Image (spheres, coloured by chain):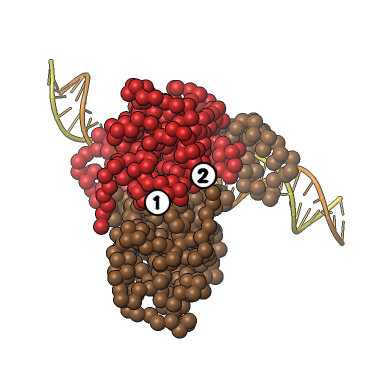
Chain colours: A brown, B red, C yellow, D orange
Amino acid sequence: MAVTIKDVAKKAGVSPSTVSRVLSNHPRISRETARKVKEIMDEMGYHSNIMARSLVSNKTYTLGMILPRPAEELFQNHFFAENIRGITTQASRNGYDLLMTAGHSEQGELEAVTRLVKGRRVDGIILLQSRRNDPIIHFLQKEAFPFIIIGHYADDEDILCVDNDNVQAAFDATQHLISQGHERIGFVSGPPNLTVSQDRLEGYKKAMEENGLRMLPEWIVEGEFLQESGYRAMSFFMNLPERPTALVVVDDLVTFGVLRGLTELGFRVPDDLSLVSFNNISLAELSSPPLSSIDIGIYQLGYMASQLLIRYIQGDKPQQMRVIVPHRLIVRESSLKTLSRWS
Amino acid sequence: MAVTIKDVAKKAGVSPSTVSRVLSNHPRISRETARKVKEIMDEMGYHSNIMARSLVSNKTYTLGMILPRPAEELFQNHFFAENIRGITTQASRNGYDLLMTAGHSEQGELEAVTRLVKGRRVDGIILLQSRRNDPIIHFLQKEAFPFIIIGHYADDEDILCVDNDNVQAAFDATQHLISQGHERIGFVSGPPNLTVSQDRLEGYKKAMEENGLRMLPEWIVEGEFLQESGYRAMSFFMNLPERPTALVVVDDLVTFGVLRGLTELGFRVPDDLSLVSFNNISLAELSSPPLSSIDIGIYQLGYMASQLLIRYIQGDKPQQMRVIVPHRLIVRESSLKTLSRWS
DNA sequence: AGCGATTGTAAAAACGTTTGCACAAACAAA
DNA sequence: TTTGTTTGTGCAAACGTTTTTACAATCGCT
């Protein structure tokens, strides 16, 4: 059997309550008693039983998360891994752990969340993705249970979330191309109903307008977050009477499609077409040529989410519900005229 | 306040113990009572408090895992994400969740494990990586605490683990190249002290020998799991008086280095040099040309680990301590003379 | 010296379950 | 009928903590 607080108490010649108070650094414990009890705890290898503790304190020191169902594998995997790293690292630093569970279906996800919340299994929940009108979010709001969204929830502005400033990011990407001397710049977007697509498109437009550049309607195409989308967009652009000389692409994976198409047709990047895209997945620097990309700080998104949620749980009301994680343009060969590579 | 077993009992006009028994499908509960109690549970939205439950039953229905410290980012991230998917999916299917925690250092990791184990926080532990003479493993063995390793632990054969048959995998990769008509085949290995490097090298040698092919010592080079290693290996090979016509490479990332080098020097893949590598990360099919690679079943490694550990926890002694997850050679353009691509 | 305030500790009640034991009712076998 | 078994349920103890209440001892004042 494991050593309990009572065992320690007995050996130290004090009551269990005293041991408990030593554990929680209660102010009204004498220096001497604390020292002795701690010594005995170490000696006996005591570790407090978290179940028992949280049963009475009603705190689990655990954050919950639902395993996202696999979507766009490549980005998804990268995002997921980096995010978890951020979340877990920061959580652990604050004495929290991360509990992951899987829902086998959309309904199953809701049930999983219900179980975590009603079963008092976690103190808060981190959501990695949110649909519009998400039943999980409705549930959490109804229960007044602490949660945070990584990303943005369009239906309600009054929900704790961490996100990027996608408008600004797209602005920066476009501005970078403009400063490289480009004037005819196209935009490859994602699904038009996603806020991320909308925001990035907006930033692109803003940059073009502020620089007084022409924007032909056919320079903007929509697609999916798929390689094939990029491939199609590329052939569309390259067949235009007036081609863009550079593209802002909404996602790295899409850019790989563009790149492959260009290579097949014998075009060169960045000379014939310069490219800048988003998310800066690890693959971006491995492609040939390496991709210029906006690093959205995936690790930090997780890190911040963890931190904000924990603070919120601990009663620290945030001054703002939406926290922005800074992005960073990583310039690589795909948008530079002068090439260089390691050897 | 949350609805407890007592609330349900009161409303149903039975004792708490009866409700508890309904919950656990106790045989000596009448059909009728069970029905009524269940109805009321649904009506009141009852969910059992897991902390209370596990306090008395001494079961947490939780598996623990330590966040691996970032190593070789690309493969690591992919591996990590897919693995977690496998682990969590299977765990959830059995009513278990996955608890992740981070250790800030090597010592911190051991402390984290200690906390989970001694604090009765989890029922078993999944280890993603193991050093030789790993203090965490020593600790778990000393405590006789259920755990499983994904991968292989060289120091002790009597530890539950899931792994690939790397010897056979390398054999298959090599055999594939041979069946494509290659006779001069090189091998790019990883760090020589890792079992995975050793096993794959062994499989390569075996295939070469069984086919009666010459193996020049300079056709085998060692390196790291890094792109740069591949780059260096490539320049070494291409400067040999007698070049190999194909390579087996120990990891996809290394292969990217080979590939980039070849492209720079104007060599074509697979015509000038055919390539087969290991791990089949998502990037493998996106490179140009797409890489032939051994899929090691990362998801399944996690899935099996989860399953075996849970069975073990539940008292189901496995007939073998080491379970092999099958691999699969995915043939793509990098090892085929005839090219084809989507359009 | 006397008093209130402070300090250190213990006893006991909770927290929400599970489960061994007891016992009544119903049933089966003699 | 009597006896023995099965079936269904309740009581109460336990699990390992935290926390409220209480109380003794010490302290700092006047």
Disc 1 residue crowd, few under 14, some 14–19, many 20+, Cα 10 Å = many
Disc 2 residue crowd, few under 14, some 14–19, many 20+, Cα 10 Å = many
Q: Which residue is at 44% across, 64% downward?
A: A270
Q: Which residue is at 42% across, 62% downward?
A: A269
When asked about the image quadrant of residue B277, the answer is top left
Residue closest to the eye, A192 or B270: B270
Tell me the SS state at disc 1: helix
Q: In the displayed structure, would residue A72 be above or below residue B249?
A: below
Residue hosting label 2: B228
Where does the image place residue A39, in percent across and percent down from the top left?
Answer: 68, 35
Residue closest to the eye, A181 or D12: A181
When asked about the image quadrant of residue B269, the answer is top left
Where does the image place residue B31, in percent across and percent down from the top left?
Answer: 20, 41
Q: Does residue B239 appear left or right of residue B325 in this picture?
A: right
Residue closest to the eye, B97 or D17: B97
- Circle 1 chain: A
Where does the image place residue A5, in percent across and percent down from the top left?
Answer: 58, 37
Between the residue at mark 2 and the residue at mark 1, the CA separation in whole angstroms equals 24 Å
Q: In the displayed structure, would residue A56 be above or below residue B180?
A: below
Residue closest to the eye, B148 or B2: B148
Where does the image place residue B47, in percent across and percent down from the top left?
Answer: 35, 50
Q: Amino acid at mark 2?
A: Glu
Q: Are marks 2 and 1 on the same chain?
A: no
Q: Residue furthest bottom?
A: A212
Residue hosting label 1: A77
Q: Amino acid at mark 1?
A: Asn
Tell me the SS state at disc 2: helix
Q: Does residue B24 appear left or right of residue B205 in this picture?
A: left
Of labels 2 and 1, the one closer to you:
2
- Circle 2 chain: B
